[in-house]
Image (cartoon, rainbow, N blue to C red):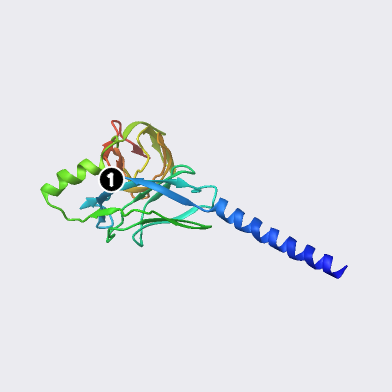
Amino acid sequence: MRVRMYRTVIGGAVLSMLSLLLAGTALGVTVSSFTPTSGLTQTPADGTQCPGAVVAITGDGFVSDGQVTSVSFNGTPSPYVTVGSNVTVYAMVPDKATSGPISVTTSRGTATTSSAFTVNPCPYTASQVVKVSASTTTGSAKAAIVSFTPKSTSGRKITITGRAFTGTTAVRIGGARAVFTVNSDTKITVTVPKGAKSGVITVTTAAGTTTSVKRFTKI
């Protein structure tokens, strides 16, 4: 009787360990590719000299395996990260980044690319601009602002609609930098900053900066 119980306990333990191993493998975050494969760093941090390339990273588990907590370029964390879906995350190349692999970290682990991202340093010469622009803007459409509501408010939130908002790095209202959330490729929710004045709204992505036709009125 003791022998039978002993074997049952051992067998159960083995099955439990196997189940945990299989579950851990299934739940692990993965990365498979990224585009573009090279780009500029954001230098300085406010992007006034170099805008910083926005890289689209493809993989799996960016939502289901826990919230993405960071994206790093050869160990340097990105200042702007946007999760597009469970299989896509966008990140800007940070200041002082060096060429190397890209790592995506969630609450359940870290996945690293098998190939290296090539950093094009800033400042750069005119000859480098031509080379870099071809690699960083391929397939990237410039954002467009169609409308925003409300058009005047004393409150804190407005909604901008348009297109190609994925990978947005900055939103300004009347010249003041605002805190924003990219809800989708066609929608951005913006918190009106305290220092905002009446004026146009601008949205900046890797493809450039677009400006609203109509002006926002700060009441």
Q: Quadrant of the C terminus?
A: top left
Q: Is residue 150 above or below residue 1?
A: above
Residue 169 visible in the shown view: no
Q: Is residue 119 above or below residue 4?
A: above
Q: Seen from this angle, which residue lies furthest right?
A: 1
Q: Quadrant of residue 182?
A: top left
Residue at x 28%, y 45% (from the top left corner): 175
Q: Is 187 placed left or right of 35 in the picture? A: right
How many neighbours does mark 1 have within 10 angstroms: few (below 14), some (14-19), or many (20 or more)? Answer: some
* Numbered-mark total: 1
Residue at x 30%, y 45% (from the top left corner): 36
Q: Is residue 40 above or below residue 130?
A: below
Q: Secondary structure at mark 1?
A: loop
Q: Is 182 placed left or right of 174 in the picture? A: right
Q: Quadrant of the N terminus?
A: bottom right
At which x and y percent is residue 192? 39, 45
- Can you identify the residue that label 1 sits on? 175
Q: Nearer the viewer, residue 55 or 31?
A: 31
At which x and y percent is residue 87? 46, 43
Q: Is 131 placed left or right of 137 in the picture? A: left
Task: Give amino acid for label 1.
Answer: Gly
At which x and y percent is residue 7? 78, 65
At which x and y percent is residue 79? 36, 55
Q: Seen from this angle, which residue lies furthest bottom?
A: 2
Residue 116 visible in the shown view: yes
